[in-house]
Amino acid sequence: MAFKSFDSHTDFARRHIGPSPEDIQEMLEAVGVSSLEELIQQTLPAAIRQEAPLSIGEGMSEAELLAHMRELANKNRVCVSLIGQGYYGTHLPPVIQRNILENPAWYTAYTPYQPEISQGRLEALLNFQTMVADLTGLDIANASLLDEATAAAEGMALAHRSLKEGRNRFFADRNLHPQTLAVLQTRAEPLGWELVVGDPEADLEPEGLFGAIFQYPDTLGEVRDLRGPIERVKKAGGLVVVAADLLALTLLTPPGELGADIAVGSAQRFGVPMGYGGPHAGYIAARDALKRGLPGRLVGVSVDARGNRALRLTLQTREQHIRREKATSNICTAQVLLAVVASMYAVYYGPKGLKAIAEEVHRKASVLAQGLERLGFRRVNKYFFDTLTVEAPGQADQIVRRALEQGINLRRVDADRVGIALDETTTPEVVEAVFRAFGGEFRYEAFEPREHLPLGLRRTSAYLTHPVFNRYHSETELLRYMRRLADRDLALDRAMIPLGSCTMKLNPTAALMPITWPEFAHLHPFAPAEQAEGYRELMERLGRWLCEITGYDAVSFQPNSGAQGEYAGLLAIRAYHRSRGEGQRRVCLIPSSAHGTNPASARMAGMEVVVVACDERGYVDLADLEAKARKYADTLAAVMVTYPSTHGVFEEGIRELCEIVHRYGGQVYLDGANLNAQVGLARPGDYGADVSHLNLHKTFAIPHGGGGPGMGPIVVKAHLAPFLPGHPVLDGGTAPVGPVSAAPFGSASILPISYAYIAMMGSEGLRRATEVAILNANYIAARLEPYYRVLYKNAKGRVAHECILDPRPFKQSCDITAEDIAKRLIDYGFHAPTMSFPVAGTLMVEPTESESKRELDRFIAAMVAIREEIARVERGELKAEESPLRHAPHTVLDLADEHWNRKYTRTEGCFPGGQSALDKYFSPVNRVDNVYGDRHVVCTCPPVEEYSRG
Ligand SMILES: *Cc1c(COP(=O)(O)O)cnc(C)c1O
């Protein structure tokens, strides 16, 4: 691992970091310090400065990295996996791989909270929602969840909150996928819900249930008519969730028509590689009446200022950042990029193509079934779509071994039963090899495929009738459709995205390349460990690096988002207290400035949230903290604190804060979202924290994908290590804390990105990146200070890696708001900073180390020009509603407006700051009407006539 690279053209860190050494000198002067070291001394409290440098070693060059990743990849063995259980082989169409998955216009985009610059991905997500709603036969679907198992847990929670009668029992089909059952168990227990597991026909006692969940087809492959059990649950007043396979639903009566209220599942097999567990898009769909309780993000149709159709995220009041401790879901980062891939798969193949794929899979399964029957093996499931479970008393191990000798993984259900799940990629040769594993020598052609679906469950209703699913079936057409959508959006490939708390840094190309290599992409999450030696080595080293960077002792890679990490960390704290006979410790102290996921996660972990005040400097009020810790001394479980704070300042009192909480018996959860301000400089594990999650999609260079994927591994001190999430596949369900995600290592296939990032940066590069991230933020703060109030600074006048600009006085003086500034920035070619978090009405700017001085200067110039535009309104030269600020963003329709009668010119509106027409980004819609969208909620593709309006 000790690669050396002295010449700068192979020095990755030099190019990951935006400003050149000369730029850094100039910026230091502007900030008013003589060196980076002096700036850090004025920024980071000396008491927490880490003593020893990181010991990760020297950074690799990109070429060295790729050679190294090739070696790791070679240690994984790609077999044909017929294990099923929610994960299937699939062909990712190359045109989608190259133009979505490998296209920075899609993968570097942020969550579409600024709808005007997100119309492309919003349309792709609306297509996803329409696809899911159509296939499940329900009214409304969200824009993705994390995986099938957590979607099932969200379905359960939705059922509970929709039923306002304090029922606490939920029935779960014993033939759910085992990992789904395990995640439901983890989720139910802290909330005091009883999970009754049984057979939907024999064991269902519907009285008093708040709901039930059934799998369709079930984990053993059976296709059961669920109408009876569904009706019984609903008659008794409960809600029904069906976990369904989307491909099977092209042939089967959908859950909505069976009477289900909610459907959940995974869109993985729509083109998304198994990836050793993820990332893939989970889905949830529901009846219209439940829409206000749906978790996650929901794309809806609205109108813009000109009355033209425009998309936006709708009903945001459902989400954790608004509901906070009243939230029942903490979902924030989801799986947008993978939902987009799956939606494009459906757009490409259309209803006929998808049905043909499903029928082909079914035919292969029919041939397999007939061959195995001829060999005398009895099937457990009478009907099937793609999965057979075969009785082979005492022979399961032997059959699985014989299959493996031919490079095929089968599912060992137990000693007497073997499962085989076929998919789009299964070839006749594979079917013949499975025959051999069962001791037969048949040719595939020896059997005539038949249909094995129950007559009464054949799908008769239409789906995907919307033109978008019937137009782009040639590669050229699809290519241009994807290009058209990408061109509507503003992602990191166009401009800096200065979103505070989100760390929108460079996603290095070399780090991304390995993720689509078959050795990383095509492993089944439950494949035998021997086939994943490369992954094991990668996770072992990455885990060590993350512990080294943070000062912790152990890691879990299972949480597949930051919020999932919070939840897993709090479950660890809860289990720790219980292990010491202190199960009454349930109070979680959370500062008022916390991210919305913090209180939501605490609630989900069965904790009671007590809010701690912040003082006028934005610091956690330590006196209030101590008072509350003392008040709840017997029941204090934890504090959740973000450091540096969400206000973008390193608080001096962090050590003391940790000591206070420990003194009263609590544990310290440190939200690691802001680790980009600390790597190489300070370690949470050294200054008193017990557990943190790390947003690998922030600090460690995994792209945001337009709102996911992400990874939120947690790092803990040794005393919490026994309470990291377990997984039935790893420990047979014996771990003290159950799984929080479907797959043992979460979205394993994106871990190579963070690994590659750390390997290429090396110890020095990582520390340098942190220093420059802090410099970039202080440079912006210093340069903009004469124009905007910088809300929070430390005693020496410094901010950490982000800063909050306060435009609230303009609201008073001339009715110009943070939103006006955010939208006007679009006209200048920028994505807005974070709006109204953590302080309502303000803008939080985080430039990251990857932005060059040139880009920072461009942003500063835009903000200064906007300040002058505000001044014109303040001076009364024009009213707020007449100003370009209020009319922003401007579009080509403004440019071409024959009846222009505004108080400013079209050039002032459309080309502010003297931008060149050559590279001008135009948002495709004018300002989107938020109120209209929430009043008229439409979350599927509107009829095509609507598209021609305007
Ligand atoms: C981003 C963020 C989170 C949540 O992370 P997700 O991956 O979106 O779930 C939590 N806390 C803070 C402070 C964050 O900035």
Image (tube, grey):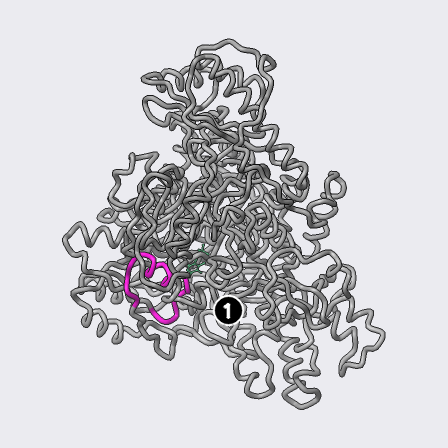
Any part of residue 709 in sight: no
- Decide whether residue 642 is among the magenta residues: no
Residue shown at the point (43%, 49%) measured from the top left: 231
Q: On the picture, is 379 further left or further right than 572?
A: right
Nearer to me, 359 or 642: 359
Nearer to me, 837 or 176: 176
In the image, residue 906 lies at what x, y percent?
A: 79, 74
**Label 1 belongs to which residue?**
844
Nearer to me, 545 or 811: 811
Q: Quadrant of residue 472?
A: top right
| Residue at the outermost left position | 581
Which of the four quarters of the rendered structure image does ligand 1 lie in?
bottom left
Residue shown at the point (78%, 73%) measured from the top left: 907
Q: Amino acid at mark 1?
A: Met
Q: On the picture, is 58 further left or further right than 833?
A: left
In the image, residue 256 lies at what x, y percent?
A: 52, 49
In the image, residue 746 lies at what x, y percent?
A: 42, 43
Q: What stretch of residues is rendered in magenta?
A: 591-609
Packing grade of label 1 (10 A; few <14, some 14-19, many >=20) is many
Using the image, determine if residue 44 lies above or below residue 535. below
Any part of residue 671 in sight: yes
Q: Quadrant of residue 537?
A: top left
Residue shown at the point (48%, 28%) measured from the top left: 421
Look at the image and tell me in which quarter the C terminus lies: bottom right
Q: Quadrant of residue 222?
A: top left
Callout 1: helix, strand or loop?
A: strand
Using the image, determine if residue 266 lies above or below residue 667. above
| Residue at the outermost bottom position | 876
Q: How many numbered marks appear? A: 1
Look at the image and tell me in which quarter the N terminus lies: top left
